[in-house]
Amino acid sequence: MLQMLKFRRREGHALTHPTAIGYARLQHGRARRGRLRAVALIVYSLGAAGLLAASAAAQLAQQTQDPLAQRLAHLGEEADTLAHSLPSFTCTESVQSQELHGRKVVRGVRFTATLRAQRDAEGKLRESFDLETVDGAPWNHGAFSIPAYVEGGFSRALRYFAPAQQACYRYTLSPDAGGSRIDFVAAPHLPPDNACTTEGTRGFALLDAQGNVTHLERSVSPRYSRLYREAPFASIDFAPVPLNGVAYPLSRHIVAELSGAGSTGRFEAQYSACKLFTATVTIHPGPNSGETPDSLPH
């Protein structure tokens, strides 16, 4: 059984246990290469049968004039774009992480970092960050505790509307100020061989007049949270960010919460100055070569 919001400190170490919201590890008085990694905020798992059924549903949605079907088709395209086409990028991340007993904050930290989201060899977007400040002061590579940290709020933020997942939910459309709202809940009475991992999931998304998502909230059951190590509650605000000439709906504000035995973890992050991630390589002359960089052989 996962232990939530329990910490232990050892000499030169500060580490958290794995939790339903995430874990962070710092060792030997410094973060491993200045980067902390956490479990996924959202887990994506599909089987071939569910993929084919949902794909057929998405094609049908694109052929109809029904407002709900049209919005689901658009959101499905955006979900797939984030999952498979979103390029590597970097943002400034500002985080407040807290542990609460009732309404009292018993542990907390604020930090800023440079977040990097990079595609690995398998095409998955991996998140890591380099710390910049801790509680308002430049990070001195010392150890500290992070009560709650989450990741996965970019490439998988819209997975509830992915074409391959739409058969797993029931959707309802209603008007909202200046746009519309789509509520979603895990579909009941699915066949035994379904590939959905949606137990106890429900939420809603707010869309602007063009059908673009601006806000999403979702919750999952305690059992689902334990099984898949997901935050029981998450809220995301979106903003379009141009990368390689394409505007992607990136998360600009994330709030996530989890409940433990008498404790609540709260994670809140703001993301700004997001841009395409590029790596640079500097070549220096050898110590005895007498060459300058301009004269290095090509």
Image: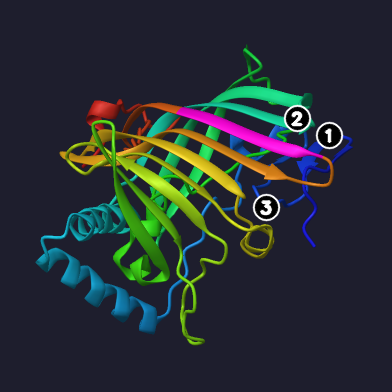
Judge left or right: residue 283 versus residue 257.
left
Q: Going 43% across and 73% down the picture, which residue do you hit?
A: 46
Residue 284 at what x, y percent from top left?
Answer: 38, 31
Q: Is residue 269 magenta?
A: yes
Q: Are marks 1 and 2 in contact (CB under 8 Å)?
A: yes
Q: SS at mark 2?
A: loop
Q: Which residues are magenta?
A: 263-270
Q: SS at mark 1?
A: loop
Q: Which mark is residue 12?
A: 1
Judge left or right: residue 5 versus residue 155.
right
Q: Is residue 68 above or below residue 295?
A: below
Q: Is residue 130 above or below residue 260?
A: above
Inter-mark Cα distance, 2 to 3: 22 Å
Q: Which mark is residue 240?
A: none
Residue 237 at what x, y percent from top left?
Answer: 40, 34
Q: Is residue 19 above or below residue 257?
A: below
Q: Going 47% across and 85% down the picture, which residue do you hit?
A: 191
Q: Going 89% across and 35% down the picture, which residue do you hit?
A: 11
| Residue type, numbered disc 1 | Gly
Q: Which residue is mark 2?
A: 143
Question: Residue farthest to the front?
Answer: 174
Whichever of callouts 1 and 2 sits on the residue coming sooner in the sequence is 1
Mark 3 nearby-residue class (10 Å; few <14, some 14–19, many ≥20)? many
